[in-house]
Image (tube, helix red, strand yellow):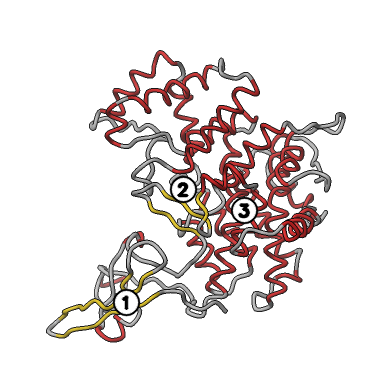
Amino acid sequence: MRDSKAVPAGKATLEYKGKSYDLPVFNGSVGPEVVDIRNLYGEAGVFTYDPGFTSTGSCESDITYIDGDKGILLYRGYSIDQLAAKSSFLEVCYLLLYGELPSKEQMEKFTFTITHHTMVHEQLASFYRGFRRDAHPMAVMCGVVGALSAFYHDSLDINDPRQRELACVRLVAKIPTIAAMAFRYSTGHPFVYPQNKLGYTENFLRMCFSVPAEDYVVNPVLARALDTIFILHADHEQNASTSTVRLAGSSGSNPFACVAAGIACLWGPAHGGANEAALKMLETIGTVERIPEFIRRAKDKNDPFRLMGFGHRVYKNYDPRAKAMQIQCHAVLDELGLHDDPLLKVALELERIALQDEYFIEKKLYPNIDFYSGITLKALGFPTAMFTALFALARTVGWIGQWKEMLEDPHQKIGRPRQLYTGAKQRDYVPFDQR
């Protein structure tokens, strides 16, 4: 069990119906102070109302920190720009799961363990064939990840630390194989098994794009770009899907079911589908010549059109992940010689305008990670339907890190939000003949 690291910072006083109630205030290591209202209902008979929980801390965590006003994102205290430039996704996985960067020996052991758990149960191949070929990859991912609990009974006991650890390893290791199989199934191509001699992301690219008749040579520029995408999407504090995983886990559900719940939540277009929406917007614009028309529409408050991939709900400044993604995006376009692609020409011109136009600068509508990742994934050869599945692949380690932390929290309780009820008061049943 982990001990609370919150530091007492005084108290807040609530005056209600002639009585005063003292509420403890705590400090975290960084960020705003928090008012502890856990005993408010029991003492005062009143609870808070916060739709979307945007002003409510649902848990104590030491994994990820975001300061949206300053454009800061930290994994375990390390800035995202440093990790994207210097680390690898598998090293970031270790960091998120265990709290510290690994030593050389720890990294070698972790890499070996993950690599030797990448295969999935052979009967899962039959499970895939139960889906239609045109099923959305996220529908397939939901079903297959949830079904893992039917295949790996030796890692379902959440009260056993060894089984919890095994479940974490299996999810990180198998999710690329599951995603690649979903992709291959949708294209009608045979499944490709992982190779232990390849790295995590290189293996995934091979499982997606190789053909049995030829050897597949991994392009290091493309592998690095995709690895960076995975790093940048690995965790993002208590977002909707992470909160869903924690909520499911609070009831004691097994880790595979919890991650499947996270995938289902991520599938929503307001959450994981933003990069797909950005690419569809570029397709709607179509040509560079039509950009001024859409820029005018974006500036018109009476026009419902919005530029997707610009600005961010959390980051009121520049998305700290966007710069790293921009570098990799341009590296991929250079490597593949795609700057003449009509769609990518539209994207590059939009990027140029957004970084120079006073309206965009004043409104802080900078290109965000979804803008650059959508372009990059298209250039890598992934269809838009796979974009959210790749997001789920990357976010799985964040989900299970948060799930693991939740189970080790002595204050953890089953999630049970309250409501402000505005329906009918108690009334008597009226028979049919009297209505």
Q: Quadrant of the C terminus?
A: bottom left
The dot on residue 37 is 1
Would residue 426 be seen by someone viewing this image from the given angle?
no
Is 355 drawn above or below residue 110 in the view shown? above
User: Along the polypeptide, which appears first: circle 3 or circle 2?
Assistant: 3
User: Label 3 amino acid?
Assistant: Val
Q: Which mark is residue 92?
A: 3
The image quarter in which residue 403 lies: bottom right
Which image quadrant for residue 183?
top right
- Residue 83: horizontal and vertical position, in percent? 57, 48
Furthest-left residue in this view: 18
Q: Residue furthest top?
A: 289
Q: Nearer the viewer, mark 1 or mark 2?
A: 1
Dot 1 or dot 2: first in sequence order is: 1
- Between 278 and 146, the one nearer to me in the picture: 278
Query: Which residue, given by chain and number where applicable, does mark 2 sit on?
Result: 271
Measure how far apart labels 3 and 1 are at the Cα level.
Answer: 34 Å
Secondary structure state at the residue bearing disc 2: loop
Q: Is residue 38 above or below residue 364?
A: below
Q: Is residue 259 left or right of residue 435?
A: right
User: Which of disc 1 and disc 3 is earlier in sequence?
Assistant: 1
Q: Choose mark 3 or mark 2, whichever is in front.
A: 3
